Amino acid sequence: MLMIYFDSDYMAGAHPQVMQALAESNLEATTGYGTDAYTARAAEKIRQACQSPQARVHFLVGGTQTNATVIDGLLARHQGVLAAESAHINVHESGAIEASGHKVLTLPQHEGKVWASEVKAYIDHFYRDDSYEHMVAPGMLYISFPTEYGTVYSLQELSELSQVCHEAGIPLYVDGARLGYGLAASDVSLPDMARLCDVFYIGGTKVGALFGEAVVINNEQLLKHFFPLIKQHGALLAKGRLLGVQFDSLFSEGLYEKIGREAVAKALRLKAAFTEKGYRSEVDSPTNQQFFRLPNTLIDRLKEEVSFEYWGPRGQQESVVRFVCSWNTLDADIDHLISLL
Amino acid sequence: MLMIYFDSDYMAGAHPQVMQALAESNLEATTGYGTDAYTARAAEKIRQACQSPQARVHFLVGGTQTNATVIDGLLARHQGVLAAESAHINVHESGAIEASGHKVLTLPQHEGKVWASEVKAYIDHFYRDDSYEHMVAPGMLYISFPTEYGTVYSLQELSELSQVCHEAGIPLYVDGARLGYGLAASDVSLPDMARLCDVFYIGGTKVGALFGEAVVINNEQLLKHFFPLIKQHGALLAKGRLLGVQFDSLFSEGLYEKIGREAVAKALRLKAAFTEKGYRSEVDSPTNQQFFRLPNTLIDRLKEEVSFEYWGPRGQQESVVRFVCSWNTLDADIDHLISLL
Amino acid sequence: MLMIYFDSDYMAGAHPQVMQALAESNLEATTGYGTDAYTARAAEKIRQACQSPQARVHFLVGGTQTNATVIDGLLARHQGVLAAESAHINVHESGAIEASGHKVLTLPQHEGKVWASEVKAYIDHFYRDDSYEHMVAPGMLYISFPTEYGTVYSLQELSELSQVCHEAGIPLYVDGARLGYGLAASDVSLPDMARLCDVFYIGGTKVGALFGEAVVINNEQLLKHFFPLIKQHGALLAKGRLLGVQFDSLFSEGLYEKIGREAVAKALRLKAAFTEKGYRSEVDSPTNQQFFRLPNTLIDRLKEEVSFEYWGPRGQQESVVRFVCSWNTLDADIDHLISLL
Amino acid sequence: MLMIYFDSDYMAGAHPQVMQALAESNLEATTGYGTDAYTARAAEKIRQACQSPQARVHFLVGGTQTNATVIDGLLARHQGVLAAESAHINVHESGAIEASGHKVLTLPQHEGKVWASEVKAYIDHFYRDDSYEHMVAPGMLYISFPTEYGTVYSLQELSELSQVCHEAGIPLYVDGARLGYGLAASDVSLPDMARLCDVFYIGGTKVGALFGEAVVINNEQLLKHFFPLIKQHGALLAKGRLLGVQFDSLFSEGLYEKIGREAVAKALRLKAAFTEKGYRSEVDSPTNQQFFRLPNTLIDRLKEEVSFEYWGPRGQQESVVRFVCSWNTLDADIDHLISLL
């Protein structure tokens, strides 16, 4: 029996159009390190999609290295990065932020999100403490969009975070590892991101590319010497044009949006089916990651034909599991999974 | 007129066989981070090619991140890495080694190579200094093979370096970014590397892959917790199987050796032609990188049809330039270039 | 009117006997960096007081640098340090631990203490997580004794922590910035510390010295290259004998114990007086730091004649304040403060 | 027979006036971390001595920590520090600069000094290299005054260095561990230092204090968040007033200048005597450190009554040795040593 996979959105290679672009350009000779025409064109397309003509765009290989490089570049030595307790940088990056010398200052998470009011309270409280110079100063805010739990910030929420950061004089940085799915599931657009965030990245690895993340620097005062920092962090791809080719393809004919939209639609179909059968979502996620609380007996049965992630027990009889859709998820896979419920 | 390119060995994509393997596996779903079957198979093939059944093999994306991660893992906090003044880690990695806290301790370079006698003298001198505990202890030796100038160590020289390190109780690490070309141009074999070096890496980026470097850990006492270190350094590829697929392909049917052998043959044909015309090699390189001292007038003329790197002036009339061959260099390109001399 | 001070235990210089020893040795010439006879003698006296003849003893200048140096020396790069949320290293050291590359992994605090059961649960939970290699491994446990809230671990509690660490194969490190006060207030002795902890330090700055902390390394497998690490962390005092002279004096004729005992007795007299007047201790501290919840009106009145630290409001009418006793606290000061209640 | 000591200028405690000031203030209670009145007064006296009313002055404990903290604060992450090969930060600080992430970029040393022309050439050459963004950018210049070999920069030389740095837009930082001796031996004054250097420190440890270095920040754009950086580097003294008391004393009644002047006079008397006897200076030092090339037979004979440092052999018959004078060197010591020649 054939297994179907819902483990994650980085199990297959690249979207066929992206792969074709790589194959077609394969024998071409270009200069390295992102100085080629493909990279320039991809950057320009991203600027246009963001309606942000002055933005600087850099392409890195993966998410953890992007977070570490950007955060290291944004913070002064005495500063740390504010982030939700559940933030990827706080939990699942093997201490990459600390390894470059910075503390992650944690905020409570609300289904993976931070609240503007709590960010503001943290900062206010910090500077009211007489001994604040003995403590790590909040130097920037990190959020993920969508979050690690698949949730998204509304335009209103993002605007509030932006304003709190602006008033505190610290940059807002958005980890967009799954940005395509977040844009498809919220009222936030790429131009909104560019307008409200100082720096964000557009995830490729999980949204159609073999690999690659596009860092968009909207605040021109920041990251002025980003190139050597990328190199120093080991995040500079020799054949940089591979990133250019992929993002050029993703930002042609609306492919990036399409991938996000379709995967989210499939995930919501799944969610509706689970709900209809009486199963509960652990988090009310509107994106391509869905978390359900299922009876262990059902989980065992599903596992014979379907692969997905186990997130942990809830009492003796139930557990939380994750199902993820991507451009590589077939309608037939969804149908089949639903038929097993 | 069509330009022909000799700038570097990372201007094109992947060798067609490698690209085909990526294309064929593209839609397949596998687990991430190198836990897939392709990666396991590639590692096994490398162990066999090295005749080193106990070796651990890890795949990283690029050279700078590989150097930074390995060196960080090998050194204690009070130690630095011995390397030639001209070493890539000392000159062209934007301070990645220092950024992870370690000093590069420089040795004189002799056409890019270090001498075993000078390594030994450094270490002896260090421990004879009464104040050595106020200084950075030599904790490992880094060499590149071939070197940044295209030269190679003979088996005898490599054995001597290995012995000096062994006696001093410090590991020998080899940066093999262009290892394929070095193996094709020396009496050193992969099993020799595995026998003599504690850790080395087999470069893919410059030898047929889109990207990727295979770290071979021969000394089982070392780098016991290498996986989290890879992650911490931002060097863990989410779709790790892309590296497995590529190295599986490179280590099938002798492709890796073939790429090295053919590019070196082309480079030597070029060298012979320049020599015959009376031009001098700046370094006597037996590998795919050739450095010639040419009249500036010739350089200007060549530049109209050929792209190559300028390395610096030698007096008023001459300059040193670099020509590099790879799997993507055509015999016709060589012929054409020779015809222009 | 003369002010009396209860702000902290580092407001005055050194205990007169310590100061006298410094004055008497002032014109003497000795070699630097702790290679002198005073330092050797102080180390030997500490080994004897600890009944730990094989212990290595190093003297550093201050607490934060001691914590940063020891922790950096104990952890591998992929590891972090477990500590209470309220731990000094987590809150009040300006990110010194992270600046040397390590994450502080926080545990719940119970009046400043961690529970052995929670340490064990953290470690167990960590290694049960499939993705633990993407996370920062718990590599050691840090506790303070007494804690930041003045509380102490009982011998039983310390033994349990030691056992949990031992079983997990990670070292136990104790920050003894105020160790003298902790020993005076618990059933734990210096030989117990040496037996149960891999590394701990005996605080001098807050217990009679001008400055200085004595690191005692009981586990001979650890910190084998501690000297260059001290230097690297900028924690090596050129005139190292100043530390030797002071600790030699503190560990002569029971001075260190005496200072601890007397200050604790004064603090407890204060506590009894506050309690008798009906005021509540915020934390039930048995050491030289006392935390009371007082009416704001009383606080305002006291502040006219007494200096002490404000810790924060409790509702509208009350606040928590701290009173600290030291060798420099006079009985008359205590009497006068009590008379004001 | 009594030994006389010329090993270094940090063998005794503090100048008696400084020690007296410490003793007199010993029982006084003050707030910590340099927020006391002594520290404020010392800072003000230094500002006056520098004729630099806007300068910020911070007090740290030792030289290595001062260098590491200042350099870490001045450099961006992609930058390194230019320094002579023989610079203390490059040789004798156990990698403290690299441990905080920065490369030391070495320049040739000329009796311990760097040449403005070579600094300029380094910077020019760097930015002419096409691949400079793959290299560590020169972000500041470090010099020591006097140098590790006892030599000093003339006002003219210092002005040239200042101008080169100014034109390149990088700060000039002076390690003044022995500044007092340098000022006594050159045409450079404290106001010159303040005018020409962005940051420098006034060494106390080797010039009359028990310990302590006063960092003077003349360029108000720099090190704006220096306090938390001091704390992060473990360089913040809890009883900060100890530094204030000492520098207050050193900058009263010209004590600091007097100590420098007298020690230099003694050293020059020694130099004259050696020269008269026909012995050669290895370096033509005008300060309190003197380096002589002596017959090994003489060295052996001297060692019976005099303690001094051995710097290394010069051929079979001779060696270089160092004699250092300080406030603690008696005229009788000099006389006796001369009598032995």
Image (spheres, coloured by chain):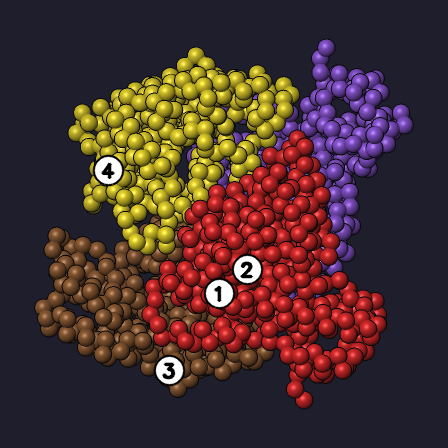
Chain colours: A red, B brown, C purple, D yellow
Q: Is residue D253 left or right of residue D244?
A: left
The answer for how far apart the CA atoms under marks 1 and 2 are is 10 Å
Estimate the x, y position of residue B246 in percent, counting from the top left: 45, 77
Dot 3 falls on which chain?
Answer: B
Pointers 4 and 3 within a single chain: no
Front residue of this view, candidates B267 and B190: B267
Residue, disc 2: A202
Q: Nearer the viewer, mark 1 or mark 4?
A: 1
Q: Which residue is mark 3?
A: B255
Residue that mark 4 sits on: D117
Question: Split into 4 quadrants, where in the image is the N terminus of chain B?
Answer: bottom left
Q: Are marks 1 and 2 in contact (CB under 8 Å)?
A: yes
Q: Which residue is depicted at the point 82% across and 17% down?
A: C340
Circle nearer the viewer, 3 or 2: 2
On the picture, is B292 further left or further right than C296? left
- Could you classify mark 3 by the number of other residues whose Cα lies within 10 Å: few (under 14), some (14-19), or many (20 or more)? some
Give amino acid for label 4.
Ser
